[in-house]
Every structure is written in C-alpha cells, then in structure tokens.
Image: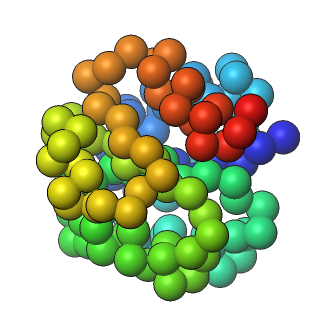
Amino acid sequence: MRTILLVDDEKAMRSKYKKILKKEGFKVIEAPKAIEVANVLMREKSNIDLILLDINIPEVDGRGIFDIVDEYAPELPIIVTSVHPLNDQKLRIPRAADYYNKLQDQEVLLKKIRGVLGI
C-alpha cells in the first residue's frame, strides 16, 4: 500500500482528499502545518511515497514546507495543490513533481498521483 502525506491546513480539504485517497487504496497521513510535516518526516520518511502540498498554509507556507521536505527527504516527490492557477504554482514552487488546481476534478488529481508514482 502506498502512503501519501497530505499537507493542508484546512480540515475539510484534508477530510475530502483523505476519503478520495483511501477509496483508491492509499494510506494517508495528515499534517496541517510545517512542524507536523517535519515530525512525520523524521519518524516515517521511509514509509512515505508522495506528498500532496497545499501552498496557502499559515505560519510557514507551502514554499517553506517544500524547503523542509527538500532538507529531510529530497527524494520524496511532491504534488503542489492550490486554487492558484498552475503557472502561479510553478512560479512559487518550481521543482515539484506536478501541480494540481483544487478546482479541477478529483480524477485529474488521481491521474497525477498515479503518474508521479508510476502506477
């Protein structure tokens, strides 16, 4: 079973994505802010296959969290998720594996996840 670290400060969004991902057979670990991302990576980075990362997170935004991941687990692929247009996402976090606009259909997200994971 593949494990996805879901980083989003909005509980409703985490619940929505967790439900979708679990239905597709993924294990989901939630982290609403940067400190929790760092803690999860220190404990479980070898068990995580992919990170879904929201850009708009209070305190430390998605770019800062991307940098944390890059330090602790640079091999982990990250899909940036946001309501911002894809080009804006790419400008803010240029080295992500892929980008997803939250206004798109959930099938688009699942296709991107499968593509990044090679499944």
- Determine whether, in the image, residue 77 is placed left or right of residue 47: left
Give whichever of 80, 90 is nearer the camera. 90
Q: Position of residue 95 (x, y in %)?
A: 38, 63
Q: Position of residue 16 (x, y in %)?
A: 46, 26
| Quarter of the figure with the N terminus | top right
Q: Is residue 8 visible?
A: no
Give whichever of 27, 107 is nearer the camera. 107
Q: Is residue 36 visible?
A: yes
**Quarter where residue 42 is shown:** bottom right
The colouring scheme, among rainbow, by chain, secondary structure or one colour, is rainbow
- Determine whether, in the image, residue 89 is placed left or right of residue 5: left
Give whichever of 67, 57 is nearer the camera. 67
| Residue plotted at (55% across, 25% down) | 111
- Number of disc labels: 0
Vertical order, 13 against 70 (above or below): above
Vertical order, 110 against 4 (above or below): above
- Determine whether, in the image, residue 42 is placed left or right of residue 65: right
**Quarter where residue 14 is shown:** top left
| Residue plotted at (23% across, 49% down) | 89
Q: Position of residue 3 (x, y in %)?
A: 71, 48
Q: Position of residue 103 (x, y in %)?
A: 26, 22
Residue furthest to the right: 1
**Quarter where residue 105 is shown:** top left
| Residue plotted at (56% across, 75% down) | 74
| Quarter of the figure with the C terminus | top right
- Determine whether, in the image, residue 97 is placed left or right of residue 11: right
